[in-house]
Amino acid sequence: MTEQKRKLEKLAGVKGMNDVLPQDAALWEFFESTVKSMLRAYGYQNIRTPIVEHTQLFTRGIGEVTDIVEKEMYSFVDSLNGEQLTLRPEGTAAAVRATIEHNLLYDGPKRLWYIGPMFRHERPQRGRYRQFHQVGVEALGFAGPDADAEIILMCQRLWDDLGLTGIRLEINSLGLAEERARHRVELVSYLEKHVDVLDADATRRLYTNPLRVLDTKNPALQEIARNAPKLVDFLGDESRQHFEGLQRLLKANNIPFTINPRLVRGLDYYNLTVFEWVTDKLGAQGTVAAGGRYDPLIEQLGGKPTAACGWAMGVERILELLKEDDLVPHEEGCDVYVVHQGDAAREQAFIIAERLRDTGLDVILHCSPDGAPSSFKSQMKRADASGAAFAVILGEDEIASGNVAVKPLRDTSGSAEKGEQRTVPVENLTEFLINAMVATAEDGED
Ligand code: ATP
Ligand code: MG
């Protein structure tokens, strides 16, 4: 390839890692602000951890025999110091690491939340990307089913706040380690009887992580998975009481649920409660949020034994649902686009734009694309395209007389008079615009 050709070649983003473009920004912001106000309503505090962690955090935290650790992690050696590092595939391990490292639980339990990109080397498809986003919560230091119920209620409130319907809740209990051990013996001997039909994944997991075989997506194995010994039948009193306590609280709060005995989750740190929120509207990638209790994790990562539970939500899947359900918010343009002609007017335009911003208005000041003065017509075209509510126009004449022209740009259907350009003294401009905005907003409400 010649040097010139190489220069002309366009560079594309990494496969499975998406750009969020301005046309989708309103949707992301709507989701983020809705989720943040929900989280505030439950007293959760934000935690932000780095995107890169030591690989060991995930192998120890998530478990060696999981999809994530076996094949999905972006791991690399830091060429400067030889450290084994990984782009975080999920948020819980890092939140727990930071909690232990900074002794956040010294004065009692904590309710935490995070949002940000996660990285998994998966086959890209609808609802499954290599960089995707999760929002998640961790309720650290709460042992009872009330915390499980709380974090589930939070999801329901979020669906309601977003206007989403048809997301159903499935729950299960994974019991305690010794109960899983007893179930495992039965499960392995059951699966051994079917070893000739198991697929490669299931065969590999038969002795390393047989519970995960129940989570198979292979249609040929559904029957076998369905008839396998159920973990719920191996639960002791304590586990059963926890599970029943959760169910009572969900019923008392009118949260419908089904018990799915095959729900096991793909991460090793879970015990007792596990749950998923599932929709039928997104095809195969129908799980929009998933979580449960992970009481062993904090000790496993070097902290004092501490009960904990949480969930993680796939942001892209929720946004897809919002689009599917036509709940995309309308993106408003800014309030004012300032058009100006001549050097004196440009100086004045800066001052006026800043003054308007001081009062809280959103203002775009026309800036010439090529550095040469733009024609009045082309500026008005840009003003229209910007979606601004008003153009404020400054020409030589206006400057000389201490006035500006104000032209409403949005369709103010009905009242023809409103669409007309007005001459407004500069000192009255802010007041005029604010009154006009209030009037338009009230019109919109009718
Ligand atoms: P799956 O069974 O779909 O692979 P998972 O068990 O790996 O899901 P979790 O680790 O529980 O998923 O992540 C919580 C949520 O994050 C999922 O329910 C989903 O909404 C979202 N999610 C997980 N992986 C991806 C991905 N590769 N792309 C987009 N969203 C994802
Ligand atoms: Mg997965």
Image (cartoon, helix red, strand yellow):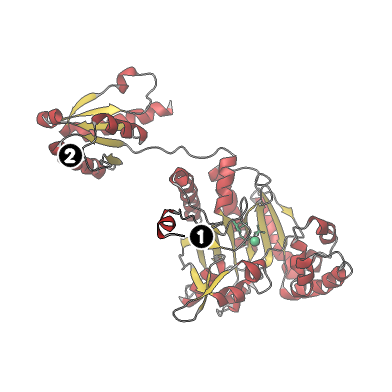
- Answer above or below: position of 189 versus 273: below
Query: What residue would you read off at disc 2?
Result: 346
Closest to the observer, 73 or 277: 73
The quarter of the rendering in which ligand 1 is drawn is bottom right
**Quarter occupied by the C terminus:** top left
Residue at 62%, 50% (x, y): give it: 126
Using residue 316 as the reference point, say whether residue 422 is left or right of it: left
State the CA–CA distance, disc 2 to disc 1: 42 Å
Few, some or many residues within 10 Å of mark 1 (<14, 14–19, 20+): some
Residue 229 picture location, percent across and down: 84, 65
Residue 146 picture location, percent across and down: 62, 61
Query: What residue would you read off at disc 1?
Result: 117
Report the amino acid beneath label 1: Pro
Residue 56 picture location, percent across and down: 57, 77
Q: Which mark is residue 270?
A: none
The residue sitting at the left extreme is 400
Residue at 77%, 58% (x, y): give it: 218
Residue at 52%, 70% (x, y): give it: 94
Closest to the observer, 435 or 29: 29
Report the amino acid beneath label 2: Arg
Using residue 434 as the reference point, say whether residue 110 is left or right of it: right
Instruction: Label 1, secondary structure: give it.
Output: strand
Residue at 83%, 70% (x, y): give it: 187
- Answer above or below: position of 346 versus 397: below
Return the disc, 2 or 1, that comes first in the chain's sequence.
1
Q: How many marks?
A: 2
